[in-house]
C-alpha cells in the first residue's frame, strides 16, 4: 500500500478517535444543547493530540450539525437531543471513504441538477466566472498541458451559479477526491481534453442562453466517456 494512502487512513482513524472522545466528553459531562465545550487548546491537551486535529474534528461535527462554533465565543453543542446526537455521531464514525465509482455517480447526479439550476439562475457575474474557467481550461488543453484542475474549476463555477449553497458545498467536498483519482487512474489524456473544450463550450452556451433542457443533454454527453470508463459499459 502506498505511503499517501496509509497516511490518509491514519488521519481518518485519528479524526474518528477524537470524535469518539468528544462524544464521550459530552455524555460524561451531561452536556445539553447550547452548552459550551472546552477550548481547542484544552481538548488537544486532554486528548493528547494537536490543536489542528481537534479543529478538523470539530469542523466535521459542525458539518453534520452536531456542534456549532461562534467566533470569539467558542464551540457549543447544537440544538439536538442526546439520543439523536449519539446516533448521528455513530453514523459519522461508520462512514466509509467513497471509491472512485461512487464519486463519479455522485458527481453526475449533482451536476445534472446544478447545470439546470445554473441555466435558470445564473447572473452576468456567474457567466463571466464560468467563461473565465472555460478559457483557462481551453488554454491548457490546447497547449497539451494537464488541465484536470481547470476542468473541475469550470464545473465548480457552474455549481456556484446554481445558487444552492448545499449543492455547492457537496461539490466542494468531492472535488479534491476526484482530482486525486483522476490523476491516479489517468482518466484524462490530451485527446479527451481537446474534446472537453467542445463539450464545455456547448455547456457554457446553453447556460448563457438560459436553456436548462439543452444544458442537461450537453452535460450527459460530457459525462458519457467517464461513465463508460468507470463501468466498462457503452451508453
Image (cartoon, rainbow, N blue to C red):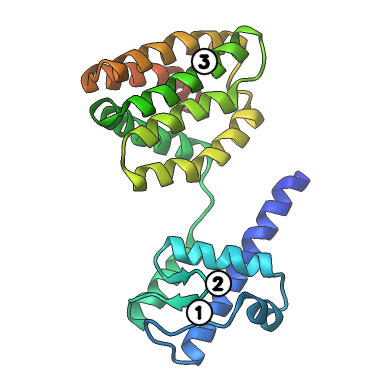
Q: Position of residue 178 (x, y in %)?
A: 55, 35
Q: For the residues carrying marks 3 and 2, which lies nearer the camera in this image?
A: 3
Residue 81: quadrant of the picture: bottom left
Callout 3: few (<14), some (14-19), or many (20+) C-alpha neighbours within 10 Å?
some
Q: Quadrant of the C terminus?
A: top left
For the residue pair 113 and 40, the one nearer the viewer reads as: 40
Residue for badge 3: 135
Q: For the residues carrying marks 3 and 1, which lies nearer the camera in this image?
A: 3
Residue at x 36%, y 36% (from the top left corner): 110
Query: Is disc 1 placed on a helix, strand or loop?
Result: helix
Dot 3 or dot 2: first in sequence order is 2
Query: Is disc 2 placed on a helix, strand or loop?
Result: helix
The answer to whether 63 is drawn above or below residue 134 in the figure is below
Which label is found at residue 19? Answer: 2
Query: Is disc 3 placed on a helix, strand or loop?
Result: helix
Q: Position of residue 166 (x, y in %)?
A: 35, 48
Spatial distance from mark 2 to mark 1, Cα to Cα? 6 Å
Residue at x 51%, y 29% (from the top left corner): 153
Count of labels shown?
3
Spatial distance from mark 3 to mark 1, Cα to Cα? 47 Å
Residue for badge 1: 23
Q: Are marks 3 and 1 in contact (CB under 8 Å)?
A: no
Amino acid at each position: 500500500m502506498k505511503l499517501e494512502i496509509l497516511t490518509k487512513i491514519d488521519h481518518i482513524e485519528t479524526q474518528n478517535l477524537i470524535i469518539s472522545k468528544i462524544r464521550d466528553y459530552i455524555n460524561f459531562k451531561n452536556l445539553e444543547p447550547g452548552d459550551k465545550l472546552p477550548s481547542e487548546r484544552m481538548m488537544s491537551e486532554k486528548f493528547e493530540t494537536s490543536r489542528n486535529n481537534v479543529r478538523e474534528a470539530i469542523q466535521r461535527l459542525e458539518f453534520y450539525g452536531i456542534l456549532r462554533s461562534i467566533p470569539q465565543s467558542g464551540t457549543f453543542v447544537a440544538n439536538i437531543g442526546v439520543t439523536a446526537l449519539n446516533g448521528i455521531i455513530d453514523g459519522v464514525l461508520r462512514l466509509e471513504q467513497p471509491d472512485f465509482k461512487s464519486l463519479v455517480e455522485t458527481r453526475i447526479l449533482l451536476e445534472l441538477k446544478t447545470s439546470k439550476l445554473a441555466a435558470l439562475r445564473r447572473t452576468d457575474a456567474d457567466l463571466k466566472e464560468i467563461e473565465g474557467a472555460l478559457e483557462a481550461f481551453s488554454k491548457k488543453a490546447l497547449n497539451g498541458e494537464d488541465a484536470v484542475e481547470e476542468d473541475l474549476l469550470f464545473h465548480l463555477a457552474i455549481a456556484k451559479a446554481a445558487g444552492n449553497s448545499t449543492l455547492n458545498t457537496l461539490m466542494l467536498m468531492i472535488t479534491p477526491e476526484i482530482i486525486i483519482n483522476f490523476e491516479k487512474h489517468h482518466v484524462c489524456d490530451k485527446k479527451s481534453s481537446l474534446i472537453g473544450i467542445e463539450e464545455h463550450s456547448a455547456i457554457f452556451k446553453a447556460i448563457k442562453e438560459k436553456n436548462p433542457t439543452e444544458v442537461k443533454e450537453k452535460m450527459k454527453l460530457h459525462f458519457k466517456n467517464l461513465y463508460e470508463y468507470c463501468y466498462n459499459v457503452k451508453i
